[in-house]
Amino acid sequence: MKRALLALALSFAAAHARAEISPQRLSDITKELASDAYKGRAPAGPAEQKTIDFIVAQFKAAGLSPAERRELVALLA
């Protein structure tokens, strides 16, 4: 799970390297996901779907699209 989150974070950061993103924006996203509203963000946890929805919305707002399965496997290998 930690490797998957790391891969997700790295792909998100790499995609944003081309786009303008401020330290404040990153801080806001981190604060949002760390808030009590997400109840720990754990898989199968009470706020899992809320976490997924937030991350998907952030990716869409950044103009990102889902990676191909082979790309994810390569990141996690």
Image (tube, rainbow, N blue to C red):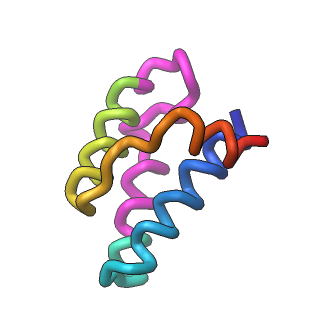
- Viewed as shown, does residue 4 lie left or right of 19? right
Quadrant in which the N terminus is drawn: top right
The percent position of residue 24, horizontal first and vertical second, equals 36, 80
The percent position of residue 52, horizontal first and vertical second, equals 38, 33
- Viewed as shown, does residue 52 lie left or right of 4? left
Residue at x 63%, y 50% (from the top left corner) = 7
Judge whether residue 28 is colored magenta: yes
The percent position of residue 26, horizontal first and vertical second, equals 41, 71
> Residue 19 is drawn in which quadrant?
bottom left
The percent position of residue 54, horizontal first and vertical second, equals 31, 42
Quadrant in which the C terminus is drawn: top right
Judge whether residue 74 is colored magenta: no
Between residues 43 and 6, which one lies in front from this camera angle?
6
Between residues 23 and 71, which one lies in front from this camera angle?
71
Residue at x 65%, y 39% (from the top left corner) = 4
Q: Which residues are magenta?
A: 27-48
Q: Is residue 37 above or below residue 47?
A: below
Residue at x 47%, y 32% (from the top left corner) = 39
> Residue 66 is drawn in which quadrant?
top left
Residue at x 39%, y 36% (from the top left corner) = 51
Q: Is residue 44 above or below residue 35?
A: above
